[in-house]
Image (cartoon, helix red, strand yellow):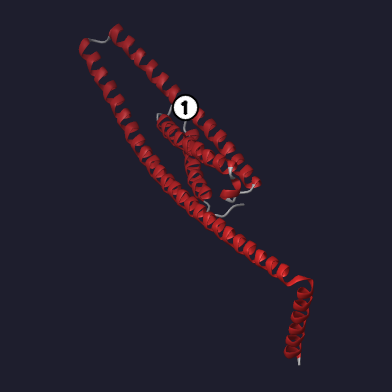
Amino acid sequence: MGDVNDPFYLVKEEIQLSVDKAKAVTERMDRLPEHNGERARYANEIVTECDSVVWQLEELNRATGMAERDFVRFRVDANELSSRKRWTSVTKDAVVAMRGNARRVVDGAAEKQKRAGGQNSNHFAAGASASDQSTQNDHYLDDHNQQQQHMLRSQDVDLEDISVSIRRIGQVGLTIGEELATQGKMLEDLEQDVDGTNSRLAAAQRKMNQVFKKAGTKGQMVMIAVLTGILIVLFLVAFM
């Protein structure tokens, strides 16, 4: 497992919280009877939450793809990348399935409301007076408007949650960019240090070759003898 301070795991934690929230709302919706009007409100909330999660997962998968193309630079091994891609795929499949179930509930409620409106219209045309029909229409429109207002308020809350999540992801993205820039600068400095060290070693090697050439075979033997004598003296001084 990677470092818990890795931006991937910070975003993963945010996504998991959203998924858990959508699952909790789904469980509340499933416990309600089929005819309960609250099911449609819960379903709309689930659809909105799932849309946000799917978008975040796609962005996270795109970032994983970038790391896969240059995993050495991002310091992530192949096993870790495979684990991240597997979690993203499994989570997305679960969220898409949960959204599809909620979408069917929303569509069913809309169809049921449409049929109810048609039945009311037929009833008014068959036997109600003009004034009664107008009153019932007003009640129907008032109820419909109240439901719409309630749904809009719920969507406003969900959109605010999405906005907060997007801002957090943006901040994480900035952190990743700053970290990459810092690591790039460190790599450039390291390359410059290595080049400088190689140059100094090459210069020292050339000087040593020049000294050996000038000294000749006898000179080299004398230098070896002198250095060996110095080493013996230092050994004696150190251990006597």
Q: Which of 66 and 145 is in front in this view?
A: 66
Q: Which of 57 and 219 is in front in this view?
A: 219
Q: Using the image, determine if residue 145 lies above or below residue 173.
A: above
Q: In the figure, residue 150 lies in which quadrant? A: top left
Which residue is at 42% across, 19% downward? 111
Residue on which the image places disc 1:
103
Picture residue at 32% right of the left edge, 32% below the top: 152
Is residue 13 visible in the rendered structure shown here? yes
User: Residue 34: in sight, yes or no?
Assistant: no
Q: What element carries label 1?
A: helix
* Label 1 Cα neighbours within 10 Å, binned few <14 / some 14-19 / many ≥20: some
Q: Residue furthest top?
A: 126
User: For the view shown, which residue lies furthest in the bottom direction?
Assistant: 240
Task: State the residue in front, 156 or 210.
Answer: 210
What's the residue at 27%, 22% (across, down)? 141
What percent of the width, then of the height, locates residue 230? 73, 84
> Residue 233, image x and y in percent?
75, 87
Assign the C terminus to one quadrant of the image. Answer: bottom right
235 with respect to 48 (left or right): right
- Count of residue discs: 1
Amino acid type of the residue that numbered disc 1 sits on in the rendered structure: Arg
Task: Judge from the rendering whether residue 232 lies leftward or rightward of residue 150; answer left or right.
Answer: right
Residue found at the far left of this picture: 131
Image height of 114 relative to 50, above or below: above
Residue 239 falls in image quadrant: bottom right
Residue 110, percent from left and from top: 40, 21
Picture coordinates of residue 4, whole percent (x, y) = 54, 54
